Image (cartoon, rainbow, N blue to C red):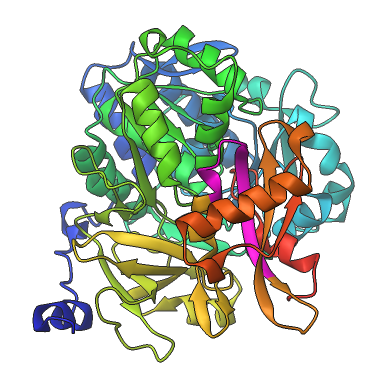
């Protein structure tokens, strides 16, 4: 029986003290974060390192002002949109902060989307300006002619192919500083959802949101300082990567290494060693692949002091093996595009693998059942979060906005339970949960059991129909050595899960794959796997 205190805590979660009051009403995030670094004497300190070289805070500030001047010369007005499809180089923070400082809304998008996705985003955002990397321009050439709202295109790269060259435009622009008279509640930037559950939606964020993720998570939880060198596997267009590689390090004057290429374990290993990276932000898939890599560096070759994971729940086995190998805990947490960054996390000195930790101070969480009422501690429920960084809406999507943003509370779409010690345990997405023989099964729990087998690199478990039309778990498995795939290993994996979990939870089918469908941020797209079968 639940204790009375537990029921009260679930029914009436303590609401956080509002931290927004510390931010002045007249506020521009880009101007604030740049000026703080210049005032601290960091004009000559490295802010970003990319394949072109090292860029100081002073150089970044100059580039931001020049890009703002470019937008004004192109007659962009406040709150009009700039669509950014850029690889991770110095041009990304230049365009993002330059637009924000000028009062223009930055809309960074996933660099690995299809032409149809970009067609939708251009139309949905009504962007007046497109800033695109030269390598990505072919996906837009046809769309540029079709987009009635699009007036100008700037290309980041050596050849602008008849459009405006980003670097030339900056070099020729007036460097005189200008800050638009924005408010902390003004629309600042949009982020489209990653598409792990279907069609992207444009989450609209305001100026104060970026500052508050720095104040609530980066400073008190990660303890970043100006001597840190940061690298994020998640790219800047992702909400997780935006904090990791831009706002968090800039909030304390640290340095960030940017990699425009796909982050392979071998490439990242060299990057970590060459740049003496101290803070690594990854995703579970990457940490598992890094540990499995034959080129994985020794502990003595790295300078890591903080490792963070998000995007999907971290398998406990991966966290423990990483700690054993490198002597640094992985701080697993959960955030979302809607909440901008992590609101629930393990933290230094308080890590419980197999859980997502405890709420970040400044956020309140509650778990609710199908009836919308709070569940008892230890029971499964949908996670709702309340905090000051929630998006204000999905652009041009009132129906989904009303379903997700419930007054002070935002639906996460994730199933959790809170254990007796107050740690939150991930149990899958709302649409990922399986009901087998009348009992709920968390696909993540089954995946965690499979992940402990020595042959498994990564896996995904989804609902599948048997011959009688009943739901059972099916596992899609990527092996460390694909040549070992076969019926005998399938049976061995099924027996392995039975030895770890209640027998009814084992996967009835195992299909070996060379890779799993993922978003550009490494999040497995289980809905694509489900769509292949009869259970939909």
| Relative horizontal placement of residue 237, taking residue 392 as reference (left or right) | right
**Residue 154 occupies quadrant:** top right
- Name the residue at 75% across, 17% down: 158
Q: Quadrant of the C terminus?
A: bottom right
Q: Nearer the viewer, residue 10 or 502?
A: 502
Q: Nearer the viewer, residue 464 or 201?
A: 464
| Relative horizontal placement of residue 120, taking residue 433 as reference (left or right) | right
Q: Residue furthest bottom?
A: 371
Q: Point out residue 414 in the picture as x, y percentages from the top left corner.
A: 46, 67
- Name the residue at 51% across, 27% down: 291
Using the image, determine if residue 39 lies above or below residue 46.
Answer: below
Q: Point out residue 471 in the picture as x, y percentages from the top left corner.
A: 67, 78
Based on the picture, tell me whether residue 452 belongs to the magenta stretch.
yes
Q: Nearer the viewer, residue 358 or 438?
A: 438
Q: Point out residue 81 in the picture as x, y percentages from the top left corner.
A: 60, 53
| Relative horizontal placement of residue 414, taking residue 227 as reference (left or right) | right
Q: Point out residue 522 in the picture as x, y percentages from the top left corner.
A: 60, 43
Q: Is residue 395 visible?
A: yes
- Name the residue at 20% across, 62% down: 422
Q: Quadrant of the N terminus?
A: bottom left
Q: Residue furthest left?
A: 5
Q: Over which residues does the magenta segment extend?
A: 450-463
Based on the picture, tell me whether residue 489 belongs to the magenta stretch.
no
């Amino acid at each position: 029986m639940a204790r009375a205190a537990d029921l009260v805590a679930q029914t009436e979660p303590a609401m956080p003290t509002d931290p927004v009051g510390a931010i002045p009403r007249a506020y521009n995030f880009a101007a604030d974060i740049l000026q703080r670094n210049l005032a601290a004497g960091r004009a000559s300190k490295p802010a970003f390192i990319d394949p072109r070289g090292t860029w100081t805070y002073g150089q970044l500030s100059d580039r931001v002002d020049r890009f703002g001047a470019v937008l004004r010369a192109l007659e962009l007005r406040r709150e009009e949109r700039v669509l950014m499809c850029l690889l991770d180089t110095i041009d990304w923070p230049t365009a993002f902060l330059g637009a924000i400082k000028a009062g223009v809304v930055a809309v960074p998008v996933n660099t690995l989307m299809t032409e149809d996705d970009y067609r939708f985003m251009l139309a949905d955002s009504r962007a007046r300006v497109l800033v695109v990397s030269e390598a990505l321009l072919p996906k837009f050439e046809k769309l540029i002619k079709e987009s009635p709202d699009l007036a100008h295109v700037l290309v980041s790269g050596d050849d602008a192919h008849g459009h405006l060259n980003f670097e030339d435009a900056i070099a020729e622009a007036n460097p005189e500083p200008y800050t638009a008279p924005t408010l902390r509640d003004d629309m600042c930037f949009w982020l489209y959802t990653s598409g792990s559950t279907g069609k992207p939606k444009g989450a609209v964020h305001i100026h104060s949101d970026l500052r508050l993720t720095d104040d609530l998570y980066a400073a008190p939880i990660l303890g970043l300082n100006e001597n840190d060198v940061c690298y994020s596997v998640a790219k800047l267009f992702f909400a997780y990567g935006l904090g990791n590689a831009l706002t968090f390090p800039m909030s304390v004057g640290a340095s960030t290494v940017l990699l425009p290429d796909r982050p392979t374990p071998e490439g990242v290993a060299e990057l970590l060693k060459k740049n003496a990276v101290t803070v690594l932000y990854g995703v579970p898939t990457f940490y598992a692949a890094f540990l499995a890599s034959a080129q994985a560096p020794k502990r003595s070759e790295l300078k890591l002091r903080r490792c963070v994971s998000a995007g999907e729940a971290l398998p406990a086995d991966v966290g423990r093996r990483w700690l054993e190998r490198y002597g640094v805990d992985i701080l697993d947490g959960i955030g979302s595009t809607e909440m901008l960054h992590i609101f629930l996390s393990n933290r230094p000195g308080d890590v419980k693998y197999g859980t997502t930790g405890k709420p970040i101070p400044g956020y309140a969480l509650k778990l609710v059942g199908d009836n919308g009422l709070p569940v008892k501690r230890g029971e499964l429920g949908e996670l709702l979060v309340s905090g000051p960084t929630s998006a204000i809406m999905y652009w041009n999507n009132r129906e989904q906005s009303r379903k997700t943003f419930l007054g002070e509370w935002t639906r996460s779409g994730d199933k959790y339970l809170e254990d007796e010690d107050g740690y939150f345990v991930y149990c899958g997405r709302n649409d990922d949960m399986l009901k087998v023989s009348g009992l709920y099964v968390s696909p993540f729990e089954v995946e965690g059991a499979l992940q402990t087998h020595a042959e498994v690199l990564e896996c995904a478990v989804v609902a599948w129909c048997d011959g009688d039309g009943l739901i059972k778990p099916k596992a899609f498995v990527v092996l460390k050595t694909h040549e070992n795939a076969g019926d005998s290993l399938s049976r061995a994996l099924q027996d392995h899960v039975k030895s770890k979990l209640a027998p009814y939870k084992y996967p009835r089918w195992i299909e070996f794959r060379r890779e799993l469908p993922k978003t550009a941020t490494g999040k497995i797209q289980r809905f694509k796997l489900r769509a292949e079968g009869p259970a939909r």
